């Protein structure tokens, strides 16, 4: 058994290797940050102690979610934002959530393939994370990964989602500011309205705005927003144009992100969002713990017994579920 060190939180003991990774991440060592993220994604037994240690001061970094349908240029916009934020003196972490390989469970796309220009910048850390079947375009371990990057001193974390289109709403729960990207000629405006994606947008971005149809897409989105009821004093999502390949509009987009951040602070919505985010994180972890308990040992046997009763018509689904929950208490 490896010699360990206490994390002083009651969440178990970390091995000296894990403790060394935490210290290295806090010092900004890229290799240690990457190894710590891998450990968290794999869900090893030391993860609770690691996260407890990293959570001592809360999350200070601002998080920006970037979502939209496939083909709108999310990765290009993300790379352009990284460049602009670096020019403004920020240290930037990027979590690019990719589809999972059906064989390994790992991310199919490569982070440094898509953002080569930033790969050698010490002020930028880019990580591909596998969605592993998680709905809503996010990876289940995204909140924990944000904690790692925050502890490593990154002032802004960009979260780029999978690109599954209409179900990409989880990013709103994980980000301080949510960008919804659309492109001309794809019918995105109407589709976004149907899917309710506009409801999660703090900033709407019409990318590839140098293409034909961009002006029509902007007008369509502004028309839809004009019909949307918002509370007095609420944030009015701007509709911005970008051409991320050339960098056009990216500085204005960064200014709008800053403006939204100031509104979050002055309105109190920032604290409310972080509270909702904390609730979501706790709920997700609690459900995961309950699921593991159901599948282990005696609980698994009880679940099989109740399932057989349901199969044989001796109970109903709600009674069966209530029985299982009662036995877990």
Image: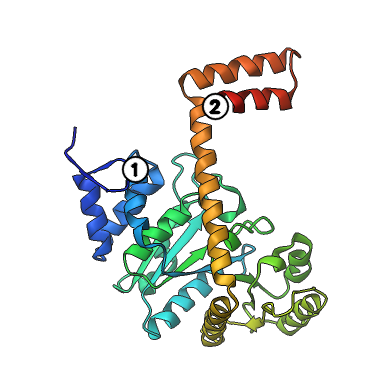
Q: Quarter-wise, where is residue 215 in the image?
A: bottom right
Q: Which residue lies at the image location 56% right of the left edge and 44% below the top edge? A: 133
- x and y, in percent, of residue 4 in the image: 20, 41
| Along the viewing direction, whichever of 27 and 119 lies nearer the viewer | 27
Residue underneath mark 2: 328
Marks 2 and 1 close (CB-CB < 8 Å): no
Marker disc for residue 148: none
In the rendered image, which quarter contains the N terminus?
top left
- x and y, in percent, of residue 329 in the image: 54, 28
Q: Is residue 46 left or right of residue 133?
A: left
| Residue 45 can be seen, yes or no | yes
Disc 1: CA contacts within 10 A as few (<14), some (14-19) or many (>=20) = some
Marker disc for residue 11: 1
Q: Quarter-wise, where is residue 243 in the image?
A: bottom right
| Residue 176 can be seen, yes or no | no
Q: Quarter-wise, where is residue 230 in the image?
A: bottom right
Against 32, residue 193 (above or below) is below
| Along the viewing direction, whichever of 315 and 266 lies nearer the viewer | 266
Against 47, residue 192 (above or below) is below
| Along the viewing direction, whichever of 9 and 42 lies nearer the viewer | 9
| Along the viewing direction, whichever of 30 and 231 lies nearer the viewer | 231
Q: Count numbered badges in the picture.
A: 2
Against 313, residue 83 (above or below) is below
Q: Which residue lies at the image location 71% right of the left edge and 68% below the top edge? A: 198
- x and y, in percent, of residue 303 in the image: 58, 20
Q: Which residue lies at the image location 47% right of the left edge and 61% below the top edge? A: 96
């Amino acid at each position: 058994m490896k010699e360990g060190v206490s994390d002083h939180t009651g969440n178990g003991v970390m091995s000296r290797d894990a403790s060394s990774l935490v210290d290295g991440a806090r010092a900004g060592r890229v290799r240690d940050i990457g190894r710590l993220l891998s450990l968290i994604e794999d869900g090893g037994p030391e993860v609770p102690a690691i996260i407890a240690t990293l959570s001592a001061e809360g999350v200070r970094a601002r998080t920006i979610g970037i979502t939209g349908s496939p083909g709108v240029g999310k990765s290009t916009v993300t790379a352009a934002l990284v460049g602009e934020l670096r020019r403004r003196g920020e240290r930037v972490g990027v979590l690019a959530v990719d589809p999972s390989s059906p064989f390994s469970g790992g991310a199919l796309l490569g982070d440094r393939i898509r953002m080569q220009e930033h790969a050698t910048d010490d002020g930028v850390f880019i990580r591909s994370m596998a969605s592993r079947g998680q709905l809503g375009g996010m990876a289940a371990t995204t909140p924990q990964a944000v904690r790692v990057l925050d502890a490593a001193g990154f002032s802004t974390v960009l979260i780029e989602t999978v690109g599954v289109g209409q179900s990409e709403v989880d990013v709103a729960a994980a980000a301080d500011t949510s960008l919804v990207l659309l492109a001309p000629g794809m019918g995105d405006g109407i589709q976004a309205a149907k899917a309710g994606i506009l409801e999660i947008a703090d900033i709407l971005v019409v990318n590839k705005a140098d293409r034909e149809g961009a002006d029509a897409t902007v007008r369509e989105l502004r028309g839809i927003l004009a019909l949307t009821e918002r509370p007095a004093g609420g944030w009015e999502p701007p509709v911005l144009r970008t051409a991320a390949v050339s960098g056009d509009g990216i500085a204005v987009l960064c200014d709008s992100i800053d403006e939204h951040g100031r509104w979050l602070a002055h309105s109190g919505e920032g604290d409310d969002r972080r509270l909702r985010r904390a609730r979501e994180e706790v709920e997700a972890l609690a459900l995961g713990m309950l699921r593991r308990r159901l599948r282990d040992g005696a609980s698994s046997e009880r679940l099989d017994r109740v399932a057989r009763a349901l199969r044989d018509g001796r109970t109903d689904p709600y009674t069966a579920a209530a029985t299982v929950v009662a036995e877990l208490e």
